[in-house]
Amino acid sequence: MTTTSIPHHHISHTLGKVFLVGAGPGAVDLITVRGAKLLERADIVFYDALVDPGMLTLCPQAELVEVGKRCGKLSSAQQFINKRLVDAAQKHQIIIRLKGGDPMLFGRADEEIQSLRNAGIAFEVVPGITAALAGAASIQQSLTLRGVSRSVAFITLAQGTEPIAPGQPISNPTADTLVYYMGRKDAARIAQQLIEQSLNQSSSTPVQILEAVSTPRERLWTSTLEELAAGKADLWFDSSSPALIMIGEALRNKNQVNGNLERPSSEVDNRLQDGQILTNSRRRA
């Protein structure tokens, strides 16, 4: 009786491939063409909590697994997500890890990539539109401006293993335009420290806060660092929507798209806090 051994390369060939796909800022039609085509072929999709449910209609054939991570809410541990991706590659050929925005920006992609590398599993990263760029497009104001802003910094305060203590200083970069992801809880403190310490910002520096960027639920709060430091946006925030805080002279309103925004900042604050929503569909294309 003879036995035939199976070559090692044949075994490894049966492993699936993991695609880390950026879902974009929120709107279903802002995912890349490559990302959408991969969803159509996916066997299983592990998706973030911030992914619009409508985007999952692009992959009706796939098994759907929510592995969302939301600040302050019960969510999957990152190590568990890493293991599930590795395990899925043993059973499926096309595995999608669908991440809000771009996978390589505040998405913990490095941890997932390292786990896949260690397991010898092929992977690919498909970029997506990050919320900061979608936000700038929505309000039709560039994050950079000749003679005013030559640098932009993307910041988050939600990546550490321990939350920032109430009295602990916040490390703010020195860029001309600052964009804070997941900064809702610390918004007033961020503004106060920028007023006190920043060389590039002052109490009159413009602030634009966008929630649920690019979706029909999008809302805009526009004012100054002084107003933000005073807590004027605290009651306006909706804890169920992701918020983006954009700060810098490049964001100063020049030609307003919506006539209702051509008012003093205090009136804008009151109007928005009373619940009026500026939807993305109302903005000029």
Image (cartoon, helix red, strand yellow):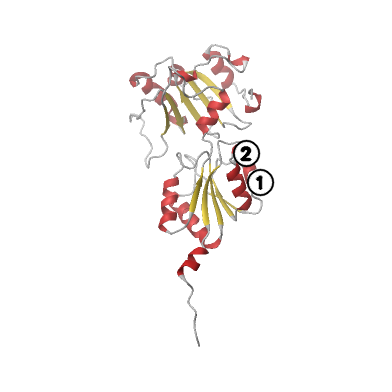
Q: Which residue is mark 2?
A: 28
| 13 with respect to 40 (left or right) | left
Q: Which label sits on residue 72?
A: none
Residue ID at (38%, 37%): 163
Nearest to the observer: residue 10 or residue 239: 10
* The C terminus, quarter of image: top right
- Label 1 sits on a secondary structure element that is helix
126 vs 211: above or below: below
- The answer to whether residue 62 is visible is yes
Q: Quadrant of residue 160?
A: top left
User: Do the CB atoms of the residues marked 1 and 2 lie less than 8 Å apart?
Assistant: yes
For mark 1, what is the residue? 57
Q: Across the whole image, how many numbered discs are drawn on residues?
A: 2
Residue at 51%, 25% (x, y): give it: 209
In this view, the residue in front, 266 or 136, is 136
- Percent from the top left, x then y, of residue 215? 61, 33
Label 2 SS: helix
Characterize the local packing of mark 2: few (<14), some (14-19) or many (20 or more) Cα atoms within 10 angstroms.
many
x and y percentages locating residue 21 in the rendered image:
53, 45
Q: Which is nearer the eye, 212 or 31? A: 31
Question: Percent from the top left, x then y, of residue 200?
Answer: 37, 19
The alpha-carbon separation of the residues under discs 1 and 2 comes to: 10 Å
Residue type pointed to by label 2: Val
The numbered mark, 1 or 2, whose residue comes first in the sequence reads 2
Q: Is residue 237 visible?
A: no
In-image side of 214 versus 120 (left or right): right
Report crowding for label 1: few under 14, some 14 to 19, many 20 or more residues within 10 A (C-alpha).
few
Query: Is 24 above or below relative to 198?
Result: below
Q: Residue 84 in the image: x percent, y percent?
A: 49, 56
Q: Amino acid at mark 1?
A: Thr
Q: Is residue 239 above or below residue 254?
A: below
